[in-house]
Image (cartoon, rainbow, N blue to C red):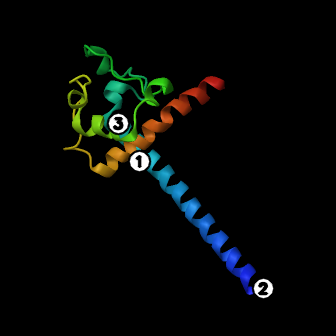
Amino acid sequence: MTPLWWKAIAVLLLIWALFVSAMLAIAQDEESGRMIYLTYCSGCHGTSGKGDGPAGKSLAAKPADHTDGKVMNRYTDQYLFNVIAKGGSEVGKSNAMPAWSGVLTEEKIKAVVAYLRNLPDKERNAKRR
């Protein structure tokens, strides 16, 4: 093999390694987001994200169903971040949704957003089984 081939192989391996590490980071963010969601959000939104948590049943406004892709796909990541960080009343939603910026770091809120993004897909896949 010529030196040019070795360079091409090295570049391809580097690209592959970067891709794999990015995928692992996304998976870690989602798992971290799931744990945070179960700890802080599931009381109202339920462990599956359907808005059926035990505390949510006593609220005047039903907590959001995060498994509804038609609804969730309308929201940008920044909007979801703001709802979590600033609370519902700051974005025109229910004031029953508290602001979590004093409790969760920016990175943790981003991890929850990453987890929320995948809930509709998980719900759809579960229905197919």
Q: Amino acid at mark 1?
A: Ser
Question: Outermost residue, front direction?
Answer: 4
First in sequence, mark 3 or 1: give its number: 1
Q: Residue, x 39% and y 40% (percent of image)?
A: 77
Distance CA(mark 2)–CA(mark 3):
51 Å
Q: Which residue is mark 2?
A: 2
Tally of numbered discs: 3
Distance CA(mark 1)–CA(mark 2):
45 Å
Q: Nearer the viewer, residue 19 or 91?
A: 91
Q: Position of residue 38 (x, y in %)?
A: 37, 36
- Disc 3 is placed on an element classified as helix
Left or right: 126 as drawn, with respect to 112: right
The image quarter in which residue 49 lies: top left
Task: Name the disc covering residue 91, or none.
Answer: none
Foreground tag (2 vs 3): 2
- Disc 1 is placed on an element classified as helix
Mark 2 is surrounded, within 10 Å at the Cα level, by few (under 14), some (14 to 19) or many (20 or more) other residues, namely few
Q: Amino acid at mark 2?
A: Thr
Q: Which residue is mark 1?
A: 32
Q: Which residue is mark 3?
A: 80
Left or right: 89 as drawn, with respect to 46: left
